[in-house]
């Protein structure tokens, strides 16, 4: 039996009880204790067992729980869930986006230092999301103002025409007004006629041409 196995056997209950007392939530405390022992399994073989393993585990578990609470709070603040009565309940197919990219975007949403937000729309009766929008502020130096940039707007084909786009754009407008943005900008493909017919009714089409300078090798 390794030192960690022995400490797990002897200290799990005490560590969990201490975390429950601090957090006041059994499930959160249990997750924090699991995180602490996982951290110990990773670090102790390399750094050595601390002089007071129980104190180390409680402190680590408490810090992990605080980080989890902060991430969840940040995610709740930066992600708004909308509901549309007419939207269908078709499930969006599994994404072809690589896991690493999804994890990166998720880290942006849960990081309070990254000014990046998301909107999700789902049927009013519940079910999976059928549309999303990603947005962020951008500086407009010559105008002396801050604008909002809509990076992505996607609605599942089966839900299009059911009010999802209107809900996303209307909510984004409210966010922009609340944050003092001067305008909200986005781009779309020249041949995306269906989307353009919607955008022409809610925004002004510009004559600017978009260029991308790719920096890949």
Image: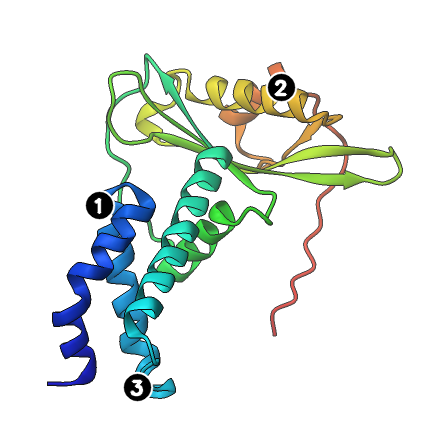
Quadrant where the C terminus is found in the figure: bottom right
Percent across and percent down for residue 53 are 29, 74
Q: Earlier in the sequence, mark 2 or mark 1?
A: 1
Q: Nearer the viewer, mark 2 or mark 3?
A: 3
Residue 131 vs residue 28, the one in the foreground: 28
Q: Bin the neighbour count of mark 2 within 10 Å (Cα to Cα): few under 14, some 14-19, many 20 and up.
A: few
Residue 44 vs residue 74, the one in the foreground: 44
Instruction: Give the residue at x 41% y 50%.
Output: 66
From the viewer's perspective, is residue 165 above or below residue 120? Answer: above
Q: Quadrant of residue 84?
A: top left
Residue 26 vs residue 122, the one in the foreground: 26
> Which element type, helix, strand or loop, lies under badge 2?
helix
Q: Earlier in the sequence, mark 1 or mark 3?
A: 1
What is the distance, in whole Å, between disc 1 and disc 3 at their CAs? 28 Å
Instruction: Give the residue at x 59% y 48%.
Output: 114
Q: Nearer the viewer, mark 2 or mark 1?
A: 1
**Which residue is the extreme one toward the right?**
142
Q: Bin the neighbour count of mark 3 within 10 Å (Cα to Cα): few under 14, some 14-19, many 20 and up.
A: few
Name the residue carrying label 3.
45
Instruction: Give the residue at x 38% y 23%.
Output: 160
Percent across and percent down for residue 78 are 50, 36
What is the distance, in whole Å, between disc 2 and disc 1 at their CAs? 49 Å
Name the residue carrying label 1.
27
């Amino acid at each position: 039996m390794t030192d960690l196995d022995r400490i797990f056997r002897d200290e799990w209950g005490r560590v969990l009880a201490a975390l429950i007392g601090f957090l006041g939530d059994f499930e959160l405390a249990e997750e924090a204790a699991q995180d602490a022992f996982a951290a110990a399994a990773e670090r102790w073989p390399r750094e050595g067992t601390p002089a007071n393993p129980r104190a180390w585990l409680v402190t680590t578990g408490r810090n992990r729980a605080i980080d989890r609470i902060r991430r969840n709070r940040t995610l709740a603040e930066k992600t708004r869930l909308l509901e549309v009565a007419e939207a269908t309940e078709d499930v969006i197919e599994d994404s072809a986006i690589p896991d690493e990219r999804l994890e990166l975007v998720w880290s942006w949403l849960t990081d309070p230092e990254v000014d990046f937000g998301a909107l999700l729309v789902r049927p009013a009766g519940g079910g999976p999301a059928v549309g999303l929008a990603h947005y962020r502020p951008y500086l407009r130096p010559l105008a002396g103002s801050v604008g909002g940039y809509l990076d992505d707007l996607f609605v599942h084909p089966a839900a299009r025409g059911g009010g999802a786009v209107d809900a996303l754009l209307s909510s984004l407008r409210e966010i922009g007004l609340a944050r003092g943005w001067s305008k909200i900008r986005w781009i779309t493909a020249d041949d995306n006629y269906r989307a353009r017919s919607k955008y022409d009714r809610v925004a002004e089409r510009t004559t600017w041409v978009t260029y991308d300078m790719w920096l890949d090798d």
